[in-house]
Amino acid sequence: MKLNHPSLIKQAAMRVFLAALTAALLATLASCDNPNPNEPGFDALSSQINALSKSVADSREQSDKLAFWQIAAAFLIVASGFALIGGAALGSMARRETRAAQEKPEPNLGHGDHEKLR
């Protein structure tokens, strides 16, 4: 009976290959951590990052302005609603008072009765 096991040399070679691959991968990842400012693309990338941060700051400022105007518009709408309701109530009161004054008979005043009203 013959067993098909990989030989110890093949296993050792596979371990060395995997270790070398892992070391190469870690070496390339470690170099990504510290960018070199002397590289040609660094200035372009830096300017793009600055433009992006400025764009984000501008959009925040615009959203703050938008929120302010939305609140101001909501306040004006509510205030105009109260003014409309108040005006309708005042008009109704004035109409009732006018109607009541028109239905009430006027007193007959003589010549000397003007003194009594004062």
Image: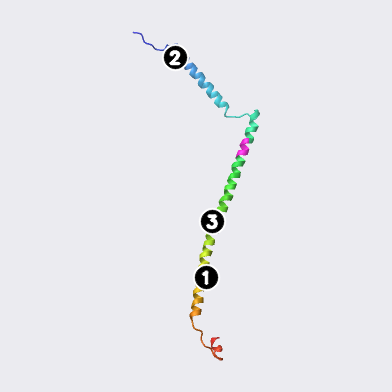
Image mark for residue 74: 3
Image quadrant in which the C terminus is located: bottom right
Q: Are marks 2 and 3 in contact (CB under 8 Å)?
A: no
Q: Nearer the viewer, residue 40 or 25?
A: 40
Measured as percent of width and height from the top left, residue 99 is found at 49, 76
For disc 1, the neighbor class at 10 Å (few under 14, some 14 to 19, many from 20) is few
Which of the marked residues, 1 or 2, is nearer the chain's N terminus? 2
Image quadrant in which the N terminus is located: top left
Which of the marked residues, 3 or 1, is nearer the chain's N terminus? 3
114 vs 40: above or below: below
Q: Secondary structure at mark 1?
A: helix
Residue at left 52%, top 70%? 91
Measured as percent of width and height from the top left, residue 9 is found at 45, 11
Which of the marked residues, 2 or 3, is nearer the chain's N terminus? 2
- Judged left or right of residue 89, residue 54 is right
Residue at the far top: name it.
1
CA gap between label 3 and label 1 equals 26 Å
Residue at left 55%, top 26%? 29
State the residue position of label 1: 91
Residue type indicated by callout 2? Gln
State the residue position of label 2: 11
CA gap between label 2 and label 3 equals 75 Å
Measured as percent of width and height from the top left, residue 61 is found at 59, 47
CA gap between label 1 and label 2 equals 100 Å
Q: Secondary structure at mark 2?
A: helix
Q: Are marks 1 and 2 in contact (CB under 8 Å)?
A: no
Mark 2, mark 3: which one is toward the viewer? 3
Residue type indicated by callout 1? Gly
- Residue span colored magenta: 48-52
Residue at left 51%, top 67%? 88
